[in-house]
Each structure stands twice: as structure tokens, then as C-alpha cells.
Amino acid sequence: MVQTATPAQRRFDVVVAGNGPAGGQAARELAASGLSVALVTRETEIGVPVTSTAGTISETLDEFDLPREVVQRDMNGLRLFGPTQKLEIWYEEPSAHVMDFRKLKEFLFREAAGAGAVAFTGTTAREPLLEGGRVVGVRCRVRSDGSVLDLRGRVVVDATGPAGVLASRLALRGRRPARLGSGVEYVMEDLPLDREGRWFDIFLGRQIVPGGYAWISPVAARSAKVGVAWILSYAERTMALEDHLRRFISSERQLVPGPAIETHGGFAYVNGGIRAHARDGFLAIGDAANQINPLFGEGIRHCLWSGRLAARTIREGFESGDLSSRTLSRYDGRWRRYRDFQWPLAAFFHRMLYGATDAQIDYNLRTFQRADLDAITRVLKNRSRWSDRLRLSYPSLKTLVRSFV
Ligand SMILES: Cc1cc2nc3c(=O)[nH]c(=O)nc-3n(C[C@H](O)[C@H](O)[C@H](O)COP(=O)(O)OP(=O)(O)OC[C@H]3O[C@@H](n4cnc5c(N)ncnc54)[C@H](O)[C@@H]3O)c2cc1C
């Protein structure tokens, strides 16, 4: 049951700011290990507003013990449409899911609270509390009455997503220029979707969204999340992103212009992540540390992992009695090992994708049509090998070279 916070409950072992996949998972695991945890969210209704399409590979459910109730649709196939070429990958068994992001966040929140975390809803984390250079808590504002609330913790976790309010204040972000990506999607019904909504479709090309892409992500046989996203540094901003979405809807065969029953949207900084995540008494995780995959902006699985790695690191700190950056920065190495070379690879394809001309996109898709589908699957699942990397990036390298000559 969710405990109600009272003013007396202001000291915790750990204060987690933000209740997305990263913060929710960190709070869930930390509370389950017996630490006293505050879970702070500015949301008054958990999961609202919705900021993600929430597609993920099947492994995520098992890895994080997520219930079926968070799944909206099982996906069998992925299609990438270029201006004239396409790539299709169909699996006999469902290999991915579209989740209900609100339900995922509700689930993590419930789990954390059920394990004893004290929930502070409608409470916005504003700035870190510092003593002698050490982070000792978070200054918050309670949205209902505007009052100030100081939550003190021996460790503070910034999991506030792309806002990264605490990490930014501590100058942990922005060492490398981050590319800002933003997206908007509509939930639409009565759509003539192919294969009764079992394909996850991605549409590339400058006539769709310059510097971005569009997607159809089914949530039922005839309903889908339909969206567009772009990376601002590649975008030609001659029209608003939502106008691109409307144009896409009116031009795509599987879509029927009509009212959106919901609108979702959000943003992320895409630069492969920050290098240092820790200060004394502090860790930044998830999108607050730009940990989203740079290719198609897949973040949920990685943010769940970031929450798990953070919980492990913090537990070690409590066990050893050392919560300084010396112990907490073990997270840096753990995160680097987790993302391995997948992020640099994704960053490479990111540049090829968003900066490419239509002809280059078609050329890449034509080459991928002949490539080993298992290798492509491994890349999409962030489990690629060096051989996959070389095999798949070779045509892109050739394209890159050709674009300069
Ligand atoms: C349009 C779009 C579509 C996407 N689609 C996918 C997809 O299909 N699959 C996928 O894997 N990833 C997708 N992503 C990325 C994925 O959603 C994110 O990477 C992931 O949600 C980040 O998790 P997080 O926990 O770090 O942050 P968030 O999910 O952003 O959660 C942060 C939480 O902190 C709260 N918060 C923010 N500021 C404060 C504050 N000051 N005080 C208190 N609380 C605060 C917010 O309310 C929020 O609940 C998408 C992203 C966008 C923008």
C-alpha cells in the first residue's frame, strides 16, 4: 500500500527524484533491499502526461519481471520504409511489444511503494541541497500549495528524465554537445493496418520528416500510436513537427485522417550519455544522464537497466559505509560495460540515418536487404558483435565516402 508522506518523513537513506523507468526501477530495487527510500514525482496522476511510445523487445519483460498488464500489443515484425526501398523482418514468434507507458510507470510506482518507498506525488524536485560540496538532499516544491519541502537523503538519485534538473545544477551534463530530439504521436483508431497490426513500421526519408522519421506502432488490430520525431540539428524546420505528423497521416496508406484519441510527446538529449554520473552522495541515471540509445531513441530498457545498476552501486555504498563519489562512480564503469560498443555503433547509424539524403537511405536499405537478418536483429536488440558491426556499417561507410566524392 502507498504510504502517505508526512512532514516528519523527511530523512531517507535514498531520495529518488523522478518516477520513469530509471527512477521507478531504482526505487523498486532499493526499497526491496530494505533501505528507506523517497520516490519524488511532479506527477499528480502517475504516468500522465504520456511521454513515450514504449516499444520494447520481449526480453525486457523477463529481465525486469514486468507483468502482461503493461503490454498493449505483441509485435512480430519490423519494417523500415525508405523513399523507394524497404526492409522487412518477420519473426514467427512475437519478438517485441508495445507497452502502455502509463501502466508501466504505475506498475513500477506500485512496486516501489509496496516495498516501502514513500511516495511524494505532485512534488517537483528543484535543486540539490549541498553541504561542504556533498549532496545531502533535494529541495522540492509541493505543487498543490507551493510550499517548499526539503527531502534529505544519504544518496540522491536524479532520474528526472531529459530535464535532468539536479544533474544540470551539478554541472554533470553538457560536456559534449547533446543533440536534442523531440517527438509527438497520436493514438488513432479504425486504421486499416497490415497483418492486423503486427508490424512495427518506421518510415525514413526527407519527404517524411527531414532529419527524423515516422512510425506506426500498433496497440490493437486497428489502432496505433502514430508519430514523428526529429533531431533538431538535422531538421529543416520549415514547418512544425506536428504538421509533419498530419502530413504523414494524410499520405500513408494504412492511416485514415481522423481525430486523435490521445496525444503523446516528449524529448531527449541524444549524445550517447554523459561520462561521469556521480558526485559525493549523488548519481544521475536514465535520460537525466542522456542514456537513451542514439539510433531510434530506444530508452526504456536501458533506463530500467540504469536503475538496476544504480541500485546495485548504492547498496554497495551502504554496505561499505562509503557513499562518496569514489564508490558511486563504480556506476560509470558498469554503465560503460552495459552499453559496450552498442552506443558508438548506434551513434554511427544515427548520423547515417538523420543526416542522410533520400538516395543514401535507399542505398543503405538495399544493402541491408541482402544482409544477414540475425545480424540486423542483434543490432536492433543491442546485442551485436564486432563482425555484425563491420558487416553492416561497411555499406554505410561506402555511402559516406561516396557522399564526399
Ligand atoms: C516521443 C518519444 C517516444 C519514445 N518511444 C520509445 C519507445 O518506443 N521505446 C523506448 O524504449 N523508448 C522510447 N522513448 C524513450 C524513453 O521513453 C525514455 O528514454 C525513457 O522513458 C527515459 O526514462 P527515464 O526514467 O530516464 O525518464 P522519464 O521516462 O522521462 O521519467 C522521468 C520522470 O521524472 C518526472 N520528473 C521530471 N522532472 C521532475 C522534477 N523536477 N521533479 C520530480 N519529478 C520529475 C517525470 O514526471 C517523469 O515521470 C521515447 C521517447 C520519446 C520522447
Image (spheres, rainbow, N blue to C red):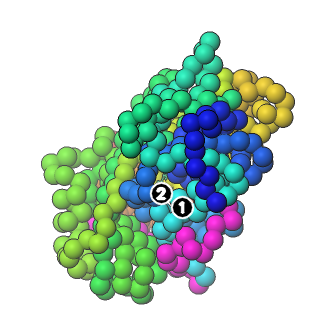
Tell me which residue sits at (69%, 24%) in the image.
Answer: 325
From the image, tell me which residue sits under label 1.
Answer: 106
Give above or below for 63 relative to 302: below
Name the residue at 61% across, 29% down: 152
Q: Which residue is mark 2?
A: 46
What is the span of residues highlighted in magenta in the rendered image?
64-92
Give the quarter of the figure containing the N terminus: bottom right
Name the secondary structure under disc 2. loop
- Percent across and percent down for residue 23 are 58, 47
Is 331 situated left or right of 221 in this image?
Answer: right
Residue 145 seen in this snapshot: yes
Looking at the image, tell me whether mark 1 or mark 2 is earlier in sequence order: 2
The reply to whether discs 1 and 2 touch (Cβ–Cβ < 8 Å) is yes
Front-most of residues 128 and 286: 128
Residue 246, relative to residue 128: is it above or below?
below
Question: How many residues crowd around disc 2 within 10 Å: few (fewer than 14), some, or many (20 or more)?
Answer: many
357 with respect to 56 (left or right): left
User: Is residue 270 shown above or below 109?
Assistant: above
Q: Amino acid at mark 2?
A: Ile
Q: Residue at x 57, y 19 (%)?
A: 130
Q: Residue at x 31, y 80 (%)?
A: 189
